[in-house]
């Protein structure tokens, strides 16, 4: 018999990277319907302020904040230990925390690249592995992995970031096939440019060009729309969500083209495959 699908109503969700951008928006859109939210990020003050805002609109919502650095293996293990010890019935994991680095690989300090790999790939994979027994026990459950349209293309000047997101999308697709029989939905969210703090964090010191300003306005999508489409897609058990129908059309169309054409378009910095357009 087909397992029931995951629903966000009354869910207990862990949102990583909830102190800003898409993570904070996930918290805002889940707050009216969830039973319990666990908000994670390094900036405790931001998490506390968000929790107070959400609590003011719904006093019966349980909200826990956890200040942790996901690039540290020990902090990931402590987080999972708390969830398991306190028997928090987690049935939604939003692996949202992530960061980028804009600029050529050759010029990059390793101190900028290492956290991109550690948070976008290692932390996302490790946290999923640590929390899977809990998600399994609470099935039907959901895992929403925040990837990027950048993961569909090799992108010069953001080579490492784009490659981490290719990993996230591929990992999510395989995981969803493995976990479907257990009633766990896995969805990869692949947004294009979204106005958040992402670009400030990704821009290197001294760099004056703001990447977001150079992307085509029609391809930019608000955090509200990205999160709305992501949650709808997860509930419909979609393997992937590309918010913004124009962007989705362009990306899906480009994937039908032979790869040498894509490579040439990227080299020329053209269209939706431009490294200046896709984050
Ligand atoms: N904005 C875009 O254009 C765009 C497009 C496609 C995909 N994405 C993806 O969307 C996700 C969210 O990004 P955003 O746009 O919302 O960026 P953002 O505003 O910079 O938020 C990033 C979040 O990740 C958290 N984070 C970063 N490093 C962390 C660490 N070591 N430990 C714990 N938390 C950490 C940050 O919290 P603290 O700093 O408090 O730790 C923050 O809450 C990322 O995975 C990003 O790759 C963004």
Image (cartoon, rainbow, N blue to C red):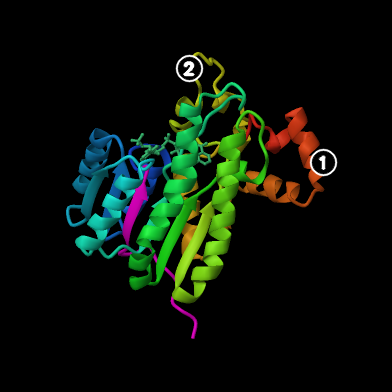
User: Within the magenta stretch, is there residue 2?
Assistant: yes
SS for dot 2: loop
Given residues 98 and 107, the one toward you in this image is 107
For the C terminus, give its image quadrant. Answer: top right
Residue 143, quarter of the rendered image: bottom left
Total marks placed: 2
Q: Callout 2 environment at 10 Å: few (<14), some (14 to 19), or many (20+)?
A: few
Q: Which mark is residue 98?
A: none
User: Within the magenta stretch, is there residue 55?
Assistant: no
Q: Position of residue 122 (x, y in %)?
A: 46, 47
Residue at the spot x=60%, y=39% of the render? 162
Q: Is residue 214 left or right of residue 66?
A: right
**Sooner in the amino-acid sequence: mark 2 or mark 1:** 2
SS for dot 1: helix
Instruction: Work out which residue is located at the far left of the displayed protein and give it.
Output: 59
The residue at label 2 has a CB less than 8 Å from ligand 1? no
Q: Which mark is residue 261?
A: 1
Q: Position of residue 98 (x, y in %)?
A: 45, 40
Q: Position of residue 194 (x, y in %)?
A: 51, 36
Nearer the camera: disc 2 or disc 1 = 2
Residue at the spot x=56%, y=45% of the render? 165
Q: Which mark is residue 205?
A: 2
Residue 159 shows up from this direction: yes
Q: Callout 1 environment at 10 Å: few (<14), some (14 to 19), or many (20+)?
A: few
Given residues 55 and 41, the one toward you in this image is 41
Ligand 1 rendered quadrant: top left
Residue range in magenta is 1-17
Residue 28 shows up from this direction: no
Q: Position of residue 185 (x, y in %)?
A: 47, 66
């Amino acid at each position: 018999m087909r397992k029931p699908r995951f629903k966000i109503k009354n869910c207990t969700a862990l949102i990583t990277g909830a102190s800003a951008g898409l993570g904070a928006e996930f918290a805002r859109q889940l707050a009216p319907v969830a039973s319990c939210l666990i908000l994670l990020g390094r900036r405790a003050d931001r998490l506390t302020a968000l929790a107070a805002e959400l609590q003011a609109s719904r006093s019966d919502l349980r909200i826990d904040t956890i200040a942790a650095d996901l690039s540290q293996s020990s902090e990931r293990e402590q987080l999972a230990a708390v969830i398991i010890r306190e028997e928090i019935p987690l049935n939604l994991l939003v692996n949202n925390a992530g960061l980028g680095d804009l600029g050529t690989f050759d010029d990059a300090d390793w101190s900028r690249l290492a956290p991109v790999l550690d948070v976008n790939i290692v932390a996302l994979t490790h946290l999923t592995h640590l929390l899977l027994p809990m998600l399994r026990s609470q099935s039907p459950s959901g895992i929403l992995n925040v990837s990027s349209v950048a993961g569909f293309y090799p992108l010069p000047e953001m080579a490492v970031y784009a490659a981490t997101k290719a990993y996230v999308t591929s990992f999510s697709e395989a995981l969803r096939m493995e976990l479907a029989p257990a009633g766990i939905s896995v969805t990869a969210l692949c947004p294009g440019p979204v106005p958040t703090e992402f670009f400030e964090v990704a821009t290197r010191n001294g760099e004056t060009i703001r990447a977001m300003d150079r992307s085509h306005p029609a391809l930019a999508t608000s955090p509200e729309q990205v999160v709305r489409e992501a949650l709808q897609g997860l509930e419909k058990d979609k393997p992937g969500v590309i918010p913004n129908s124009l962007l989705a059309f362009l990306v899906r169309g480009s994937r039908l083209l032979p790869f040498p054409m894509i490579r040439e378009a990227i080299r020329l910095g053209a269209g939706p495959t431009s490294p200046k357009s896709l984050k």
